[in-house]
Amino acid sequence: MPALFQKTPPSGIALFDLDGTLIAWDCQLLFRHFVLRREASRGIFLPVFLAFLPLAPLLGAGGMKRVFLSYLWKIDPETLAEYSREFAASLMPAIYPELREKLERQRAAGHLLILASASPEFYVSEIGRELGFDLTLGTPVETGAFFPDLENHKGGAKVERLRELLPASYFENGKLRHCHGYTDSCADLPMLAFCESVTVVNPSPRLTEIARKSGWEIVRPSRPWKSKAEFFLRTLALLTGVGVDPGGLRNGMVENQAVR
């Protein structure tokens, strides 16, 4: 058993999602833009992804993730590792201030910090390192193939992996002992079932209703877009590699507001 996971459970556990929770965007979009700004030729694979979009209901999230990652075809592993490190560092100014504060409070309390994301693990691990997480989990991806093999780390997959990695003593009555979960997505409801308390970030109407009925904290930090049209244009720029910073990572975030 790794030294991190002693049989005696920690005084508390903080379980964080990444995309939409610690940062406004889906990091897959941000990383694509990061890579295309350095290797513009990889943008030629965008039509492949667009061609497969009508098949999304059939392929599912994992299948579409394989198609989306086709732009990394035959990328050199050392180059990918270097990009991942640089990308992680570039995200730090865009971490939601409220969530950074909550993370630091959990750390100060001596709690075990876990980052559990559905984004590819090759850069999620670097983000976790930058933020000082004790354990970082993402989607394992075997790059190189045009449609890389992966095990989509989403929904129930997060629960299964946590059960595999954490000692049985960390669980009590089906929950992680003294665990606080943070997410923006209903996809993480299986993970939240592990938690004694929960904070949801910019939740959808459905998640907002669940949160209010459950007595969960709701926080609504400001995002870098002001309208659906602006979100669409920024997303298009991220997909195509256009612009220096369409994600608004360097512009700072407007002061956030937390609500119950």
Image: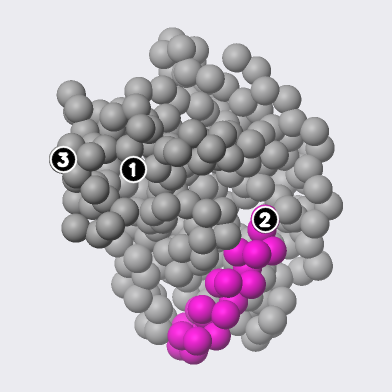
> Which residue in the structure is indicated by mark 1?
155
Of mark 1 and mark 2, the one earlier in the sequence is 2
Is 40 placed above or below 28 here?
below
Is residue 93 left or right of 48 when viewed as pictured?
right
Is residue 164 left or right of 206 when viewed as pictured?
left
Name the mark nearer the viewer: 2 or 3.
3
Amino acid carrying mark 3 in the image: Ala
Give coordinates of residue 172: x percent, y percent. 20, 27
> Which residue in the structure is indicated by mark 3?
168
| Residue in view at x 80 percent, y 33 percent | 255
The picture quadrant where one finds residue 137 is bottom left
Amino acid carrying mark 2 in the image: Met
Name the mark nearer the viewer: 1 or 2.
2
Specify how the rendered protein is coloured.
one colour
Q: Can residue 15 be found in the magenta stretch? A: no
Specify the quadrant that holds the C terminus: top right
Is residue 79 left or right of 250 when viewed as pictured?
left
Chief SS of the magenta region: helix
Is residue 80 left or right of 64 when viewed as pictured?
right
Name the mark nearer the viewer: 3 or 1.
3
162 or 135, nearer to the observer: 135
| Residue in view at x 63 percent, y 61 percent | 30
Range of magenta residues: 72-92
Give coordinates of residue 49: x percent, y percent. 51, 67
Q: Kindly report the distance in space between the C-alpha atoms of the residues bearing marks 1 and 2.
A: 25 Å
Give coordinates of residue 5: x percent, y percent. 26, 50
> Which residue in the structure is indicated by mark 2?
92
Task: Classify mark 2: helix, strand or loop.
Answer: helix
Q: Can residue 85 be found in the magenta stretch? A: yes
Of mark 2 and mark 3, the one earlier in the sequence is 2
- Any part of residue 257 in sight: yes
